[in-house]
């Protein structure tokens, strides 16, 4: 059985939580997102326990790599120095010991992305072995990265898979057009119009023309799709109420790997200018999707443009929550990193900061930055938005 799914040892940070006056997490409602009260989980037992492996989403892969780097580099206990033993265990705390960050020096690691659905299937396979452990040939992971909603949980997951979806950032599905062609004059489409373009609700054989929506008449809309294992595909399909790839073949489009505009950029001018494609707002806005401002633009939905403000306040219709998903009842060090009360999610007031910093945090002469703001920066640098503007940064919902 992998170390990631062994039971955890109660840790010393329970005492710290009491000293800081933390409160216990309230019970949650399975059917709705809940905002947890902050409490330090029992993840610090004085030794480095495990590599905390995340797998799944392409959309959140690089952001979680950046989060791993910050977590791995954040301060904690003083370690036993080799050749002394037991190695990677904590020495007794000193007045200078930083207790609020990665106390045990656990290691976060993001595995190569194969899509949200693939990561969730891996997570749900973790207890499918003959004795309830890891089956032969299944990669051990600690949590799944998911950019799709709980409603799109793979059929691999069953009642024995008690999962918790921790929403740590918000994103949106943006609708991209390519400039210099038939789509140029179109700045807005309604939800119903997008359903017709992508799903052929009317049954006319996906024959929509850009001229039908304010563009240049006489040019059929070229619909491009997304690989079906991705959270982006699952999310836009959910929003549209049916297969977002339904009109790809009929319009001469391509099914593409999510969030990379390169293949459409390389089309001839007419086909490029007739194209439409859904993708991550965060990936688009940071340039990571290879959609340049000179070549592309985003179409508003129902008169609302996708912006960080409209995504956070949910006025943009196609906004989504990005999740890290873990198995409830597993080892505390996983929760201590990506859980709803863990390092990523706890409020900035519970992280350490440099003395003299006027932002929320616990002043500590032995840190070189405000660690709460460092987490915020990872989110915004990825083009994403915080779930909660203040307080605890995450929401969560249970599956089973």
Image (cartoon, grey):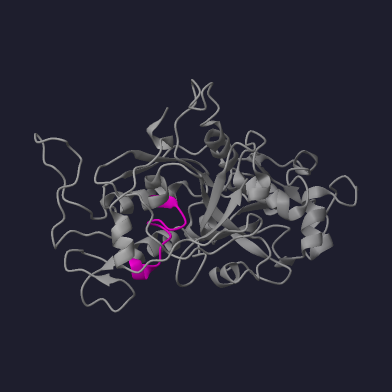
Q: The N terminus lies in which quarter of the figure?
A: top left
Whether residue 286 is situated above or below residue 231 in the rendered picture: below
- Look at the image and give the residue range highlighted in magenta: 337-351
Point out residue 62 in the picture as x, y percentages from the top left corner. Answer: 43, 48
In this view, the residue in front, 88 or 248, is: 88
Is 227 part of what is drawn in magenta? no
Which quarter shows the C terminus? top right
* Residue sticking out furthest to the left: 83
- Residue 376 in percent (x, y) is at 40, 64
The x, y position of residue 390, in whole percent, is 46, 72
How many numbered marks appear? 0
Q: Is residue 307 visible?
A: yes
> Would residue 274 be seen by someone viewing this image from the given angle?
no
Q: Residue at x 22, y 78 (%)?
A: 356
Q: Is residue 355 left or right of residue 288?
A: left
Q: Nearer the viewer, residue 273 or 282?
A: 282
Task: Return the x and y of residue 163 as percentages of the image width and height.
Answer: 56, 45
**Vertical arrangement, residue 376 with respect to residue 125, above or below:** below
- Above or below, 362 against 329 in this view is below
In the visual, does 267 lie left or right of 1? right
- Residue at (74, 48) in percent of width and height: 222
Q: Is residue 349 rendered magenta in the image?
A: yes
In terms of secondary structure, what is the magenta stretch mainly?
Answer: loop
Nearest the camera: 239 or 135? 135
Going 35% across and 71% down the picture, which residue do you hit?
A: 349
Q: Is residue 117 left or right of residue 143?
A: right
Occupied quadrant, residue 100: bottom left
């Amino acid at each position: 059985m992998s170390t990631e799914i062994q039971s955890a040892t109660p840790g010393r940070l329970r005492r710290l939580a009491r000293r800081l006056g933390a409160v216990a997490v309230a019970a949650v409602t399975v059917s709705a997102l809940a905002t947890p009260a902050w409490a330090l989980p029992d993840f610090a037992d004085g030794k480095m326990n495990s590599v905390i492996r995340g797998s799944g989403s392409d959309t959140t892969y690089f952001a979680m790599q950046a989060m791993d780097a910050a977590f791995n580099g954040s301060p904690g206990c003083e370690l036993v120095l080799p050749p002394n033993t037991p190695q990677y265990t904590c020495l007794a705390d000193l007045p200078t010991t930083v207790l609020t960050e990665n106390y045990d020096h656990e290691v976060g690691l993001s595995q190569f992305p194969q899509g949200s659905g693939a990561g969730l299937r891996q997570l749900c396979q973790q207890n499918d072995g003959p004795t309830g452990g890891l089956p032969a040939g299944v990669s051990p992971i600690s949590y799944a990265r998911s950019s799709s909603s709980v409603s799109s949980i793979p059929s691999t997951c069953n009642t024995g898979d008690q999962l918790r979806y921790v929403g740590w950032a918000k994103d949106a599905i943006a609708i991209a057009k390519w400039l210099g062609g038939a789509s140029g004059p179109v700045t807005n489409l309604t939800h119903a119009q997008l359903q017709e373009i992508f799903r052929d609700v009317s049954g006319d054989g996906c024959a929509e023309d850009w001229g039908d929506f304010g563009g240049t008449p006489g040019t059929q809309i070229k619909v491009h799709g997304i690989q079906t294992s991705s959270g982006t595909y699952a999310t836009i399909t959910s929003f549209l109420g049916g297969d977002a790839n339904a009109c790809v073949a009929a319009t001469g489009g391509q099914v593409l790997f999510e969030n990379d505009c390169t293949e459409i950029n390389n089309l001839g001018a007419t086909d490029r200018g007739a194209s439409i494609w859904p993708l991550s707002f965060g990936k688009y806005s940071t340039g990571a999707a290879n959609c340049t401002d000179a070549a592309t633009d985003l179409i508003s939905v129902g008169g609302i443009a996708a912006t960080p403000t409209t995504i956070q306040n949910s006025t943009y219709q196609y906004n989504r929550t990005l999740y890290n998903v873990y198995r409830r009842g597993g080892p505390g060090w996983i929760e201590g990193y990506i859980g709803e009360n863990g390092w990523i999610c706890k409020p900035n007031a519970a992280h350490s900061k440099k003395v003299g910093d006027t932002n929320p945090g616990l002043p500590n002469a032995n840190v070189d930055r405000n660690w709460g703001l460092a987490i915020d920066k990872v989110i915004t640098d990825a083009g994403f938005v915080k779930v909660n503007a203040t307080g605890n940064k995450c929401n969560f919902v249970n599956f089973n």
